[in-house]
Amino acid sequence: MGLLIRFVIIAIIIYLFYRGIRYLTDPKRKLDDAYEQERYYFYDDVKNVQKNFFITYKGAMFEGEKYLGTTDHSFDVVSIFVWVKNESKLQGFTKDDFRFLQSEILSNYPEATISWKNPIEQLMNV
């Protein structure tokens, strides 16, 4: 009986350790932390085209939708549509900020063209 209790306690400790590591390395948690601290973070599943990506930058949360298409040599993400979750968080953003975000997106999807939703599109076209 004592051996069984020791085995159960060790199993519980291993499980709690495993759950703690999973919690600390969860990318969604890192995205939420970066959003609260107004830092840059890019959250994406590059291998799954159907999942949208999220970017947090300077306190604003952006979401991007990827579209698969053909390039000269393969199937790849060819179009990306990006919008902000809360437009009021855009106060103080400049064209340079959006160029930075665009370069970060293009570093993961070099074949893509990026379209911004209004009001960002209006700023970028001026």
Image (cartoon, rainbow, N blue to C red):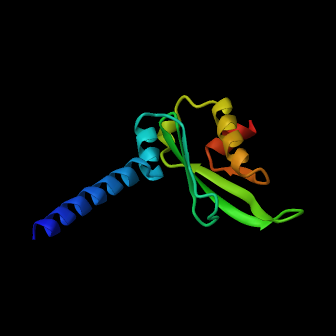
Q: Quadrant of residue 122?
A: top right
Is residue 94 shown left or right of residue 7? right
Q: Position of residue 4 (x, y in %)?
A: 16, 69
Q: Position of residue 74 (x, y in %)?
A: 83, 65
Is residue 72 shown left or right of residue 2? right
Q: Nearer the viewer, residue 8 or 2?
A: 2
Q: Position of residue 11 (x, y in %)?
A: 25, 63
Please report the residue visible at 10 percent of the width from the left and 71 percent of the height from the top. Answer: 1
Please report the residue visible at 71 percent of the width from the left and 40 percent of the height from the top. Answer: 103
Q: Nearer the viewer, residue 94 or 35?
A: 35
Vertical placement of residue 106 versus 97, above or below? below
Q: Quadrant of residue 64?
A: bottom right
Residue extending farthest to the right is 72
Q: Quadrant of the C terminus?
A: top right
Please report the residue visible at 61 percent of the width from the left and 67 percent of the height from the top. Answer: 50
Vertical placement of residue 12 versus 92, above or below? below
Please report the residue visible at 89 percent of the width from the left and 62 percent of the height from the top. Answer: 72
Q: Nearer the viewer, residue 99 or 76?
A: 76
